Image (spheres, coloured by chain):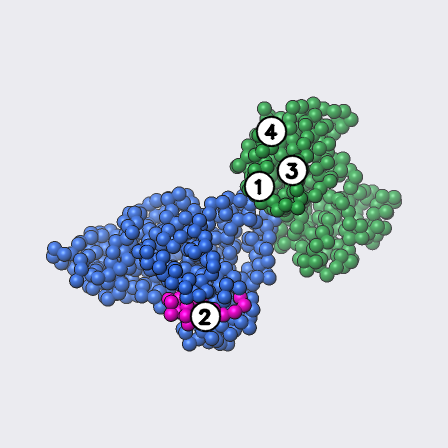
């Protein structure tokens, strides 16, 4: 039994492959409603604002005929572990099968896993992991290139605070891709080298080689926290602009987990060009990532809940 | 003269007298009154205790413990902390002033002394707060604290960020000849950090505490001590850079001393795996190369002593989300056993060295009547069985704090008797009050 999805770093490789296979299978039936999860109750408990991820899970769950409940959270209240556990135990007693949880503290699900006997799915915990985003990114890349082995994936920007990067590295490496991490040194912990990723701070060098350029969202607080001089300078050094777009190799794909900060991670001109007249074979996958998110999350729910009476 | 006790047949390991050989000890009125390779005294008022195959050492002296009283009795009490110490072969401890309220006036020292007196176990010495309320703003009344019994000063848990104040404190305290025990972590560099700035904090997404947070703070205090002639003792060194800095300072004639904890000597950041809150402490567990540098530090004497930083917590302070969890390790119950197992048995340091850095030198550093079993000394004694095997079981701790990353570890070698002023206070794990 796969049990939970706490993160990809300690998830079995077979599980990742299984979710990929199911995603490809389910993607053929996107037009009709499936009844694989009829009678299952899935709840989302989000302690951070989210529109995309939560909605994506909801659509995925309903597609497979599960009941979906969005548990309202008082965002203003401080969410200590204790009250979190109480809430989850209450949900459990209402017959919940799986809980999709987002929480601002790293390791939240690791702590919960031995305290509640329901399937836990991590929808983002602190700066730790966001495994369903990584799974859908892997699926998107795999689907577009028809392979992962040998691909060069450059993840650009705020590596330090990115839970997407932490989830992606392991999955991408194990599927045979090479991962490059690029960003300002204050946002790029050197220890990521030990994960097998290549770490650097020059975007130009990396994007010439990359098959996928993955732009990470930059939070405005980083500048206030003294990690960056300004968003303008960030954009100047690490933003995707027209000149850099022209450096991309043929057939490369630009990805972003959304929502975009236009003028920071990417300039308006570069975005317009990607959408209207991209350079040879360059594609942008932001919309595709949203659609794939539903498929992969459905595959995941099906995988985690199928054997659950 | 009261009843006499003759400890017979054991090996005495006492670096203060450079003895590692068979010695019989005769105790009366709480003191060692005779010591010889063999004492044959057959008189009615002499109780002979046969200690063949055992080792006698001066009771251990732990300069850095938190006993939480007053204010946090759910975490520890003075009585329970001292019981744990006695069970663990530790006969003298110095308690840190970060209680609620802080030990920043003589009445607090009197209160703690009273509690220790009631407990009637090992010796308890109080470290007074360096600044009022440990707030890093104003000096405490050092003379009255000393008159009440404070043996040193510290704001442990906090670094005194204000360099000018620290400069003045060092200067002011010179005539008092008391150590300033500094918790060296620059608060701006620590920030909201919870773990070492290494691989594990990186991949687990935990806010980091870099090594340099410590080394920068050590550097400032070392230079202030040099400039003022102050008596600086650096608490719980955690990283290679700090060891290197202390080595440099000592080579350049700056009079400083330093301590290291058992957990920093034996564990690394790897223990964080799975968001293990038991591995959360300040300073944090660091990398293997740091650990090796700390071991080298105690072998070469750059680091002077071992002290546990015993930091007991309630279970729920650790059974929670990592960021919310308390910092610290409960250590007194098992520290000696653990050090025998992990340092002495593998030959990393000798038993003589362990006794030296966890009894003789700490006592000398703080000026305590302990750390030696020479004729006339106070009969504070630990009897060790170096071959006894056991398992660290936090459920059996005398300390209220069951928080330890060493739970379940097998140990070889442990204290089997503890004497305080010649009185048997512990035998085979049972403590007599």
- Residue B146 belongs to magenta span: yes
The chain displayed blue equals B
Please state the chain letter of the residue tagged with numbered disc 4 in the rendered image: A
Position of residue A241 measured from the top left corner of the image (x, y, whole percent): 81, 52
Residue denoted by label 3 = A45
> Chain A is which colour?
green
Position of residue B45 measured from the top left corner of the image (x, y, whole percent): 14, 56
Per the rendering, the mark at residue A213 is: none
SS for dot 1: helix
The reply to whether the C-beta atoms of the residues labelled 2 and 1 are less than 8 Å apart is no
Please state the chain letter of the residue tagged with numbered disc 1 in the rendered image: A
SS for dot 2: loop
Report the residue that reaches farthest toward the front: B107
Please state the chain letter of the residue tagged with numbered disc 3 in the rendered image: A
Magenta segment range?
A: B136-153
**Left or right: residue A291 compared with residue B390:** right
Residue denoted by label 4 = A94
Per the rendering, the mark at residue B141 is: 2
Q: Residues within 10 Å of mark 4 (few under 14, many from 20)?
A: few
Residue denoted by label 1 = A83
Q: Residue at x 68, y 34 (%)?
A: A70
Report the residue that reaches farthest toward the left: B43
Q: Quadrant of residue A223?
A: bottom right
Position of residue A179 measured from the top left corner of the image (x, y, whole percent): 68, 47
Taking A276 as reference, is B372 above or below it? Answer: below
Q: Disc 2 vs disc 1: which is toward the camera?
A: 2
Q: Disc 3 vs disc 4: which is toward the camera?
A: 4
The reply to whether the C-beta atoms of the residues labelled 2 and 4 are less than 8 Å apart is no
Disc 2/disc 1 C-alpha distance (Å): 43 Å
**Left or right: residue B294 compared with residue A6:** left
Taking B26 as reference, is A305 above or below it? Answer: above
Q: Residue at x 67, y 37 (%)?
A: A72
């Amino acid at each position: 039994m796969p049990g939970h999805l706490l993160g990809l770093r300690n998830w079995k490789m077979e599980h990742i492959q299984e979710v990929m296979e199911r995603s490809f299978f389910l993607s053929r039936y996107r037009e009709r409603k499936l009844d694989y999860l009829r009678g299952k109750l899935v709840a989302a408990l989000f302690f951070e604002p989210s529109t995309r991820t939560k909605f994506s899970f909801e659509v995925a769950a309903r597609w497979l005929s599960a009941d979906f409940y969005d548990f309202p959270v008082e965002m203003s209240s401080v969410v200590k572990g204790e009250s979190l556990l109480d809430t989850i135990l209450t949900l459990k007693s209402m017959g919940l099968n799986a809980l999709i949880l987002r929480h601002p503290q790293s390791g939240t699900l690791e702590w919960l896993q031995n305290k509640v006997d329901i399937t836990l799915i991590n929808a983002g915990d602190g700066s730790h992991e966001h495994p369903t985003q990584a799974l859908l990114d892997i699926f998107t890349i795999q689907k577009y290139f028809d392979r992962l082995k040998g691909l060069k994936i450059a993840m650009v920007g705020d590596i330090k605070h990115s839970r997407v990067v932490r989830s992606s590295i392991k999955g991408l490496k194990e599927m045979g891709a090479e991962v490059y991490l690029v960003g300002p040194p204050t946002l790029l912990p050197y220890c990521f080298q030990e994960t097998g990723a290549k770490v650097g701070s020059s975007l130009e060098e990396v994007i010439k080689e990359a098959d996928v350029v993955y732009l990470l969202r930059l939070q405005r607080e980083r500048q206030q926290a003294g990690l960056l001089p300004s968003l303008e300078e960030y954009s100047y050094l690490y933003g995707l602009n027209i000149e850099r777009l022209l450096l991309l190799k043929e057939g490369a794909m630009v990805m972003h987990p959304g929502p975009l900060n236009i003028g920071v991670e990417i300039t308006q001109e570069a975005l317009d060009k990607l959408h209207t007249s991209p350079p040879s074979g360059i594609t942008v996958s932001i919309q595709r990532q949203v659609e794939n998110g539903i498929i992969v999350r459905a595959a995941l729910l099906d995988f985690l809940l199928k054997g659950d009476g | 003269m009261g009843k006499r006790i003759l400890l017979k047949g054991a090996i005495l390991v006492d670096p203060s007298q450079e003895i590692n050989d068979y010695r019989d000890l005769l105790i009366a009125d709480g003191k060692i009154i005779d010591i010889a390779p063999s004492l044959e005294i057959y008189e009615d008022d002499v109780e002979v205790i046969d200690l063949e195959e055992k080792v006698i050492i001066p009771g251990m002296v732990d300069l850095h413990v938190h006993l939480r009283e007053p204010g946090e009795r759910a975490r520890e009490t003075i009585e329970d902390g001292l019981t744990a110490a006695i069970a663990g072969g530790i006969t003298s401890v110095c308690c840190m002033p970060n209680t609620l309220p802080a030990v920043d006036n003589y009445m607090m020292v009197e209160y703690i002394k009273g509690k220790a007196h009631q407990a009637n176990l090992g010796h308890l010495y109080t470290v007074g707060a360096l600044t009022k309320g440990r707030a890093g703003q104003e000096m405490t009344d050092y003379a009255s604290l000393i008159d009440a019994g404070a043996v040193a000063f510290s704001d442990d848990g906090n670094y005194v960020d204000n360099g000018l104040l620290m400069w003045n404190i060092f200067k002011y305290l010179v005539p008092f000849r008391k150590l300033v025990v500094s918790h060296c972590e620059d608060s701006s560099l620590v920030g909201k950090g919870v773990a070492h700035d290494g691989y594990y904090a990186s991949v687990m997404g935990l806010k980091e505490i870099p090594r340099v947070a410590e080394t920068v703070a050590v550097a400032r205090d070392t230079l202030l001590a040099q400039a003022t002639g102050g008596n600086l003792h650096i608490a719980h060194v955690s990283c290679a850079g700090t060891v290197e800095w202390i080595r440099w300072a000592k080579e350049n004639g700056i009079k400083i001393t330093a301590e290291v904890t058992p957990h920093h000597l034996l564990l690394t950041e790897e223990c964080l795996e799975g968001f293990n809150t038991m591995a959360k402490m300040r300073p944090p567990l660091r990398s293997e190369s740091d650990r090796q540098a700390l071991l080298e530090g105690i072998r070469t004497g750059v680091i002077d002593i071992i002290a546990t930083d015993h930091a007991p917590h309630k279970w729920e302070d650790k059974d929670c989300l990592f960021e919310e969890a308390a910092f610290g390790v409960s250590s007194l119950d098992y520290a000696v056993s653990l050090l025998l197992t992990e340092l002495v048995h593998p030959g990393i340091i000798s038993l003589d060295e362990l006794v030296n850095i966890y009894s003789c030198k700490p006592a000398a550093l703080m000026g305590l009547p302990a750390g030696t079993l020479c004729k006339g000394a106070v009969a504070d004694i630990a009897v060790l069985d170096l071959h006894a095997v056991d398992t660290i079981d936090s459920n059996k701790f005398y300390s209220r704090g069951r928080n330890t990353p060493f739970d379940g570890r097998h140990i070889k070698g442990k204290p089997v008797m503890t004497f305080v002023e010649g009185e048997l206070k512990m035998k085979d794990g049972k403590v007599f009050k």
